[in-house]
Amino acid sequence: MTNEIGSFAGRLRALTPARVRLDPRGGAAPLSAVLDFQASHARARDAIRQPVDWAAVKAGLGDRPLLELESRAPDRDTYLRRPDLGRRLSPESLARVPQAKPDLAVVIADGLSGFAVAHHAAAMVAALEAALPETDLGPVALVRQGRVAIGDEIAQAMGAPLCLMLIGERPGLSVSDSLGAYLTWAPRIGTPDSARNCVSNIHGKGGLSHRAAAELIAYLAGRAREIGATGVALKDERGQAALPSAE
Amino acid sequence: MPVYSASAGGETYRFGSLARLMAAATPRRSGDELAGIAAASEGERVAARYALADLPLAEFLNEALVPYETDEVTRLILDSHDRRAFAPVAAMTVGDLRDWLLSEAADTAALARLAPGLTPEMAAAVSKLMRNQDLVGVARKIEVVSRFRTTLGLKGRIATRLQPNHPADDLAGIAVAVLDGLLQGTGDAVIGINPASDSIANCTGILEALDRLRQDFAMPMQSCVLTHVTNTIKIIEAGGPVDLPFQSIAGTEAANAGFGVDLAVLAEANDAARSLKRGTVGDNVMYFETGQGAPLSADAHHGVDQQTLEARAYGVARAYDPFLVNTVVGFIGPEYLYDGKQVIRAALEDHFCGKLLGLPMGVDVCYTNHVEADQDDMDTLMTLLAAAGVNFVICVPGADDVMLSYQTLAFEDAAWLRRVFGLRPAPEFEDWLAAMDLGPARQALPDLSGLAGRMGIPA
């Protein structure tokens, strides 16, 4: 009887990723559920708090030209309290950004998940190069304590018409290493978020693959050059023209 | 513009405006520091409280913190102020009001009479002079009852929003989470879903599924899909089964514009839902969510501290006599409320101010992973809120919202609060639970497969 209920509850549980318990007896949550929750929370907290293993990221990027930069937020606590400081380069870092004039400035920032950057950033750059063979990506900028908007200042200083920010997304309990990609046309300090396109949920637990994300970014970058804009004016309309008419 | 000043610790501090004084008097929180309006020292903070204690309440009727001419929320607050209800406290200072609220004279009936006489700014001001135990103790005396198909807010009861979110809005997955919640006796405030997709067709499909469930089980409950209020108006116009229109609101006209709403569209939704007459025991229909920091994040804060602006959001809400209001206190992130201490304080302020202004106040006891908080902080907060008589809390399976990626309370937490504090569900829902043999006095364990089968879950 117990097994029958157990297997039936198991089939119900398979219908949702939620932490459903489905125990008709009620009462306190079992210790196994409490510890599993704590393990997931610990992983998310560590993703936020532990610094990116930049040496590994650099190794993954091979012999590509790199640029190591810092925001105005000196440490993690300041970064979390003061998003405005994470959106701007330290003066010393700004002075080191070359006027490389790439077609597309690629910026990697820790954001809220060091795990995301460690697991996915280098592979995303390689996938992007494959998806954009004709595009000059310039030196890859690696930013400590950076927010999305810091890419605007970097790309502006480089003289790039387009910026791609690869950044760690805020971890959830189920996925702690999700990478987000933000594409911005004519990036400059003060660009509103509504003027960006976001490709989110790049991760290996049912998220977007590196290749699929790179192909979408390549498509958006091409359309951005055609219409001279990113953001609300630019939508993913791939394949829609090929759909059969409903009439 | 008047200048306010006070001395503390042998030093005199001056505050160039009422907004500066209010911000400086506020307990420390990261959002006011981010806005550059927080007290520069602990000494200045206490000096501001001395000055605020001596401030006549009537000052708030003469000095608008957000300009009357350019902000419809200010106009709503001042134009709807009830001077007759204000009369008993009209000669008081903010400090006097604090003392009166804590006195026995401020009983449930007196507090109900006073509510329309207080402006949100007055409520915010007095809260800044109150310790956490004061916020709990006064809120506990207030009873705000709202009704639709259940009756919420009665003393001795606590209700729950059952939040069965699913990352892809899968109806079977949603149903499993609903079943999980019903097994633990939750859902009497609302079964409310944050949809992953805001498309009208998707939202209507979820509403229809929840309405079928309600009718199949003759369940006294109300459902809500938390999509933009303009979407809900369209769903109502198309004949969809809307019980409660939802909207996030804030305390300034500009911040509401950032949410894509104004007072007129909220009134339109309220009228449209009431015209359906779907409630059985009452006609409160609106469901509002709020939270400290929203105006600052929309760059629409006018140099006013986030807690005062939050109280002004309650000034917006009460114009519509809503069924549910809750602060989503820990959702906004550490740049507004940094840690468990700040989240707990803000939640008690929000609950107190909402209740004092006459709102049926609930709280989403919650945090995100980048806030310095954990489930122990939530245990502390839910216990304080139960002591404060909160109308409802929000519950999800295992405290983990897999759609919105944040943590709130679990169904077990609501059951714990009811056990430990002797609190009961809403009366209509309590009767239904008993009839379904799901209540505390049940004769047998609930039949999981039978219930799932009746709900049409394919398993």
Image (cartoon, grey):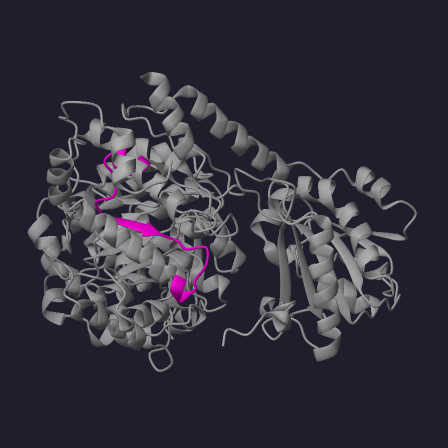
Magenta stretch: residue B195 in it? yes
Q: Is residue B183 magenta?
A: yes
Residue B128 visible in rendering: no
Query: Tag count in the figure?
Result: 0
Relative placement, left or right, of B395 versus B337 is left
Q: Is residue B387 left or right of residue B229?
A: left
The x and y percentages for residue B159 are 22, 43
* Magenta span of residues: B180-201
Q: Quadrant of the N terminus of chain B?
A: bottom left
Residue B362 in sight from this viewpoint: yes
Residue sitting at x 76%, y 37% = A53
Q: Is residue A78 above or below residue A155?
A: above
- The percent coordinates of residue A160 (x first, y second) are 81, 69
Determine the image quadrant of residue B175: top left
- Which quadrant holds residue B120? bottom left
Residue A176 on image: x %, y %: 60, 39
Residue farthest to the right? Answer: A63
Residue at 69% in and 47% down: A110
Q: For residue B248, which quarter of the picture? A: bottom left
**Where's residue A95, x and y in %?**
84, 61
The one of B314 and B111 positioned closer to us in this rendering: B314
Give the left or right position of residue B50, taking residue A39 as reference: left
Give the answer, above or below, for where A116 lies relative to A24.
Answer: below
Q: Quadrant of the C terminus of chain B?
A: top left
